[in-house]
Image (cartoon, rainbow, N blue to C red):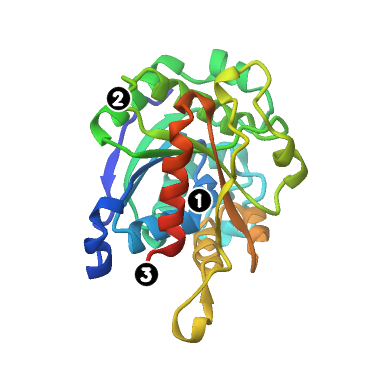
């Protein structure tokens, strides 16, 4: 098991004059994900935070991404490797997918990357076996505690842990919630669960908590949203689906990921109850700024 922590300063996002004037509304975000490409779920919100609000976005990636080889056929010609071969993929994919992640992150304005390199052995839905037998849970917990202590974050973004979803996504979310809960209540960021429309909408609408993990229970207020179809640019001809699609395009080893390119989508965020009810108003205010800040 690799115990590699890499903190990379990829870009310094320079606040525009407008963003500088809004410094009191410039949130610091930590995104906790399981795989390279999961961050696309939050693409437009991250872009607005880093570019329109003059805030910052850091990302903690839990796995090494080595299990994402099954649909890498088209990427083989690009990288000169048979990435659908499990042995070849597990040797080369972790480094390749980090580069793809950072290329997409440059678009969204992600600032720092923290790589925890936990084993990605492929897709299952049993998050508890991952936490008990596959990942070094103590190591991940310690690193998340460290990031949260040093980062002074206002918000943490995670994937909403719906049941019929990859176990790694759910496990990463559980560990992030538990890490925030270990902090002093006066210093905690607000931790949110996110999901974009067009994926398992019926399941997401019914979600209250992941069975067996009461820490994942959400308030039903909301969701708080950002519509990727929001227009900007000359004559309003552009919209934020472009950002998500550009990021998706960088993940060339993930062939089926390319099928998620679209011309519509709404990023939705729910507040976990462990935050306390005061977090609802603060989240509403932050997302209002995301929606309305001049760009």
In the image, which disc is placed on residue 145?
none
**Quadrant (top left/top right/bottom left/bottom right) for the C terminus:** bottom left
Q: Which of marks 2 and 3 is nearer the N terminus?
A: 2
Instruction: Kindly identify which residue carries mark 1.
Output: 42
Residue 58 visible somewhere in the drawing: yes
Determine the image quadrant of residue 105: bottom left
Measured from the top left, where is residue 224 in percent x and y?
55, 48
Between label 2 and label 1, give the one nearer the viewer.
2
Distance between the alpha carbons at the discs numbered 2 and 1: 26 Å
Measured from the top left, where is residue 268 in percent x and y?
58, 48
Instruction: Kindly identify which residue carries mark 2.
Output: 186
Local SS, label 1: helix
Residue 64 visible somewhere in the drawing: no
**Quadrant (top left/top right/bottom left/bottom right) for the N terminus:** top left
Give me the residue at 63% from left, 29% from top: 167
Distance between the alpha carbons at the discs numbered 2 and 3: 31 Å
In the image, which disc is placed on residue 294?
3
Q: Earlier in the sequence, mark 3 or mark 1?
A: 1
Q: Up-down: is 219 above or below 27?
A: above
Tell me if label 2 and label 3 are in contact, CB under 8 Å. no
Q: Which of 34 and 55 is in front in this view?
A: 55
Local SS, label 3: loop
Distance between the alpha carbons at the discs numbered 3 and 1: 20 Å
């Amino acid at each position: 098991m690799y115990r590699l922590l890499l903190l990379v300063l990829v870009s310094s996002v320079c606040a525009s004059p407008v963003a500088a004037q809004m410094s009191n509304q410039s949130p610091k975000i930590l995104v906790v994900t399981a795989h390279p490409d999961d961050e696309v779920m939050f693409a437009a919100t991250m872009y607005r935070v880093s570019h329109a609000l003059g805030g910052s976005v850091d990302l903690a990636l839990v796995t090494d991404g080595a299990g994402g080889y099954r649909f890498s056929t088209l990427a083989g010609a690009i990288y000169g490797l048979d990435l659908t071969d499990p042995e070849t993929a597990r040797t080369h994919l972790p480094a390749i997918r980090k580069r793809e992640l950072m290329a997409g992150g440059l678009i969204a304005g992600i600032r720092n990357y923290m790589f925890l390199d936990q084993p990605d052995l492929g897709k299952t839905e049993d998050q508890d076996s991952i936490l008990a037998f596959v990942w070094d849970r103590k190591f991940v917990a310690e690193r998340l505690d460290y990031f949260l202590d040093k980062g002074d974050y206002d918000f943490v973004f995670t994937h909403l842990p719906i049941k019929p979803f990859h176990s790694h996504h759910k496990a990463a979310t559980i560990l992030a919630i538990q890490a925030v809960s270990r902090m002093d209540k006066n210093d905690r960021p607000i931790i949110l669960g996110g999901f974009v429309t067009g994926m398992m909408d019926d399941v997401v609408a019914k979600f209250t908590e992941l069975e067996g993990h009461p820490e994942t229970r959400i308030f039903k207020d909301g969701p708080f949203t950002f519509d990727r179809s929001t227009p900007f640019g000359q004559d309003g001809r552009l919209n934020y689906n472009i950002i998500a699609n550009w990021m998706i395009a960088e993940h060339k080893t993930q062939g089926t990921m390319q099928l998620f390119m679209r011309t519509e989508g709404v990023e939705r965020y729910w507040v976990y109850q462990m935050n306390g009810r005061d977090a609802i108003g603060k989240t509403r205010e932050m997302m209002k700024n995301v929606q309305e800040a001049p760009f």
